[in-house]
Amino acid sequence: MVDMKHPTPAVVPDLYAVNLDRSVQIQAQLDIGDWSGMGGPTFLEEPDDPDWPAGQSRRDANIIEFRTHVPPDFAIVDIYYEIDPQTGIAVGKIEDRIAVPDMRYECRGRSSDCFTSDGRVSSWSVLPAIATYEEYIVVFASWIVRPPKPGNKPTVEANWTFHFVNE
């Protein structure tokens, strides 16, 4: 259920990869985003070379958890197994001559069953069992601004990144 008193996060929420009992908590790195729809900052400039966080073991973390009680209206999780060593850009597989992530998951709408919320955090059990030594994960999420502010963008959105080096 959407809390209409605070329907959209006022600031960019922190994102974590966690396990079921929350004993593993790995914070994602905020990459780019735009919170101007809520009167916040815009940081849309993509870096020349992607800046992946230091690799760490994911262990049994298979849940992404936004530290906000309001789930995104739309979310994408892209998983890549390698990066180009020269550019740092994630390298996926090629389909119809187009590079795509090795794995992609999408969640559309707060009313879908992807996310759960306990009143503090919004969680999605989306990360699959570890399939490779390294994982480069990009999470995109957007929220519709409710109620909209005249003259402002009607959404807020951001990208976060994880880099896992698994045993």
Image (cartoon, rainbow, N blue to C red):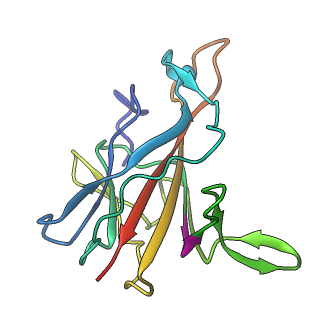
Q: Is residue 35 above or below residue 127?
A: above
Is 99 one of the magenta-colored residues? no
**Quarter of the image where the C terminus is located:** bottom left
Q: Is residue 106 above or below residue 132?
A: above
Residue 2 vs residue 103, the one in the foreground: 103
Bounds of the magenta segment: 78-82
Residue 127 vs residue 93, the one in the foreground: 93
User: Magenta residues: mostly which secondary structure?
Assistant: strand
Report the residue at 63% width, 17% height from top.
Answer: 152
Q: Is residue 127 above or below residue 54?
A: below
Q: Position of residue 49 (x, y in %)?
A: 62, 45
Find residue 13 and report its image quarter.
top left
Q: Position of residue 15 (x, y in %)?
A: 34, 49
Is 79 one of the magenta-colored residues? yes
Q: Is residue 94 above or below residue 118?
A: below
Residue 62 as seen in the image, left or right of residue 42: left
Find residue 91 and report its image quarter.
bottom right
Q: How many marks?
A: 0
Q: Position of residue 166 (x, y in %)?
A: 33, 78
Report the residue at 88% width, 76% height from top.
Answer: 97
Report the residue at 77% width, 70% height from top.
Answer: 99
Task: Give the residue at the far front of this rendering.
Answer: 86
Residue 50 as seen in the image, left or right of residue 98: left
Q: Position of residue 33 (x, y in %)?
A: 55, 35
